[in-house]
Amino acid sequence: MRVMNLSPTKPDSIWQQIYREAQSAAHDEPVLADFFQVTILDHDNLGDALSCHLANKLASNEAPASLLRTVMDRAFSTPDIIHAVAADIVATVKRDSACNLHLTPFLYFKGFLSLQSYRAAHQLWAEGRQSLALLLQHRISLTFAVDIHPAARIGSGLLIDHATGLVIGETAVIEDCVSIMQSVTLGGTGKTSGDRHPKIRKGVLIGPGAKILGNIEVGEGAMVAASSVVLKSVPAHAVVAGVPASVVGDARSEEPSQAMDHYFKCD
């Protein structure tokens, strides 16, 4: 049964819910009891469990789990980051009709897992540790088929649904409460240097396969329809569609990212 109304700013509440769900899942599926024990039940808090889970998933000869665990432990003990993690879990449970448990994105959803891995890489980038940040980006891309540059600036309360083929460029900005579907590109338009990637404002919904290119803005509460190619800035609360995209109507809600309604009527 779906559990709602947990505060995204209280990681401890989210962790307690995940822990209870893991206990129930281990009871219901005994063959996976050891899996739930190692990934959830052996840990004391959300950050510790997530650090272990991601370090094991992303490990390679070049980036062993022990090295990644050190990076992840530091990232997920940072208050701003762990609060963003909790907000992303809540967003996923509320908006994804296939997700009924807080445990599910934590263990299985590569959109959520790649986003949290990016958060650790972004911390490294901000500290000037660019080589390690880029190595982590490389591991995220190979493991999850998601390519997020560690310099991109991303808020909290995001749903990245399915995630395969997602590309987010170096100077991209994504504000809070955005929902992004699979195969989306937030890219540049060529070899231009400097600030060259899109700025996605709060509450935006980006449909599957959409390509948003260049240093343009998608205004607050706007919606980009599936497979659109967006080359010009999008007004707040507008719906754009097509190749190249143009305004075809107004969003049905203040925050399309929350409603997750991909249908629209043309004016």
Image (cartoon, rainbow, N blue to C red):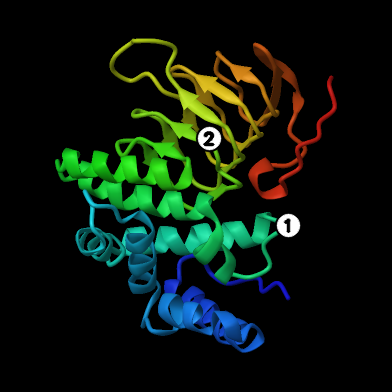
Give the amino acid type for the residue marked by disc 2 in the picture: Gly
Q: Residue at x 66, y 15 (%)?
A: 245
Q: Quadrant of residue 56?
A: bottom left
Measure the alpha-carbon separation of dots 1 and 2: 21 Å
Q: Nearer the viewer, mark 1 or mark 2?
A: 2
Q: Nearer the viewer, residue 222 or 198?
A: 198
Q: Quadrant of residue 40?
A: bottom left
Report whether 213 appears left or right of 98: left
Q: Residue at x 40, y 63 (%)?
A: 83
The residue where tag 1 is placed is: 97
Residue 165 marker: 2
161 above or below 224? Answer: below
Q: How many marks?
A: 2
Q: Residue at x 37, y 81 (%)?
A: 43
**x, y percent for residue 183:** 58, 33
110 above or below 69? Answer: above
Q: Quadrant of residue 25?
A: bottom right
**x, y percent for residue 91:** 58, 57
Marks 2 and 1: in contact by CB < 8 Å?
no
Q: Helix, strand, or loop for circle 1?
A: loop
- Quadrant containing the C terminus is top right
Does residue 157 show up?
A: no
Give the amino acid type for the residue marked by disc 1 in the picture: Ser
65 above or below 26? Answer: above
Residue 132 marker: none
**x, y percent for residue 61:** 23, 52
Q: Residues within 10 Å of mark 2 (few under 14, many from 20)?
A: some
Report whether 244 appears left or right of 252: left
**x, y percent for residue 247:** 71, 18
Q: Residue at x 44, y 49 (%)?
A: 115
- Mark toward the start of the polypeptide (1 vs 2): 1
Report whether 31 appears left or right of 40: right
